[in-house]
Image (cartoon, grey):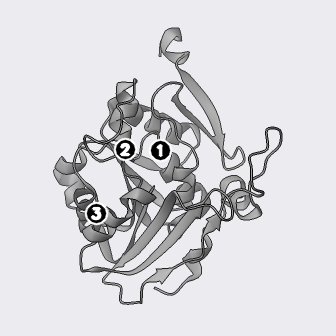
Amino acid sequence: MTPEAASEISLDGFLGGRLRLAQPRRGYRAGTDPVLLAASVPARAGESCLDLGCGVGTAALCLSARTGAVCDGVELQPDYAALARQNAEANALPLTVWEADLMALPDALRQRSFDHVMLNPPYFAQGAGTAARDPGRDRALRDRGDLRDWLGVAVRRTKPKGSVTVIARTDRLPELLAAVPPHLGSLRLQPLVARTGRPAKRFVLQGFKDGRAPFVLCAPLVLHEGETHLRDGDDASNTAQDILRNGAKLRFLDADR
C-alpha cells in the first residue's frame, strides 16, 4: 500500500479494543450496527456463519472473537473485501471473503450451507434517499435488489434449523416482514432505541429455518442512559456497554426457538 493510500485508512478499535480494524476514512464506516448484529447470532465455537455484505469484516470478526465461529463473508466492493481479508489476518481470526455480487454468488459458495447467516442490508431501497458523495459509501447504503432478494439468498444458504439474523432501519420493517419466506419461522424481533421513551430507529429480526415457535416481540434494547446526549463522557447503557465493549451476546438469544 502506498503512503497516499495508507493515509486514507483509519485503524479503529471494537469490542473494547480486542479488535483493531482498518477501514476507509471516507466512505462507509462501521459503527455499532455490525457489532449488535454479531451479538445477536446464536453461534457456538466451530459453527459456520455467512455474512452477506461483510464490508471490512466487522460483524464477522466480532462474531468469531465472541464465539469461535468460523465465518465467510460476501462483499461486492473490492477495496472493502481487501480490507476485510487484511483485518482477519491482523486479528488472527478465520474469515474467507468472497468478492461477489449477492445476486450472482460463485458456484462454490452456492453449493455450501451454513449454521448461521447474518446480514446488514443497505439502509435505503434503490432510488430512495439522497446519494452519498462518496461512491463506495453510496453503494454500501443503497440496495441493488430488494430485501426479498437478500432474505432469499440468506435462507437458501442456511442449514435446516439454522438462524438468519438481520439488522435494519425500522422504516424497512414492513418490507422485511413481507419478504419472510414461509419456511423461516420462530421469528423474534428486537427493537433498538437510542433512549427510553424514544421510537425505535433500528431493529434486529431473527428467524430459524423450519422453526415453529411463536413470534416474539422483545422489550426494546435501550442503548443510552438519560434523556439527552452528554457532550463529555460516555452515556451508553450498561447492557449496550456489555455488548459493544465486552462482546456480550444479545439477551434474546436465550429465548426458545
Please state which of residues 149 and 89 is positioned toward the viewer in this rendering.
149
What residue is shown with label 1?
57
Q: Is residue 120 left or right of residue 244?
A: left
- Where residue 72 sits in the image (x, y, percent)? 38, 52
Q: Secondary structure at mark 3?
A: helix
- In the image, is residue 15 above or below residue 22? below
Q: Residue furthest right?
A: 233
- Where residue 129 sits in the image (x, y, percent)? 35, 39
Which of the two discs, 2 and 1, sits closer to the camera?
1
Instruction: Name the amino acid type tagged 1.
Output: Gly
Q: CA distance from mark 2 to mark 1?
A: 9 Å
Number of dots carrying numbers: 3
Q: Earlier in the sequence, mark 3 or mark 2?
A: 2
Please state which of residues 223 and 18 is positioned toward the viewer in this rendering.
223
Instruction: Name the amino acid type tagged 3.
Output: Leu
Q: Estimate how packed mark 3 is, as few (under 14), some (14 to 19) or many (20 or more) residues with alpha carbons within 10 Å.
A: many
Instruction: Name the amino acid type tagged 2.
Output: Val
Which of the two discs, 3 and 2, sits closer to the camera?
3
Label pair 2/1, CB-CB below 8 angstroms: yes
Q: Which mark is residue 97?
A: 2
Q: CA distance from mark 3 to mark 2?
A: 20 Å
What residue is shown with label 3?
151
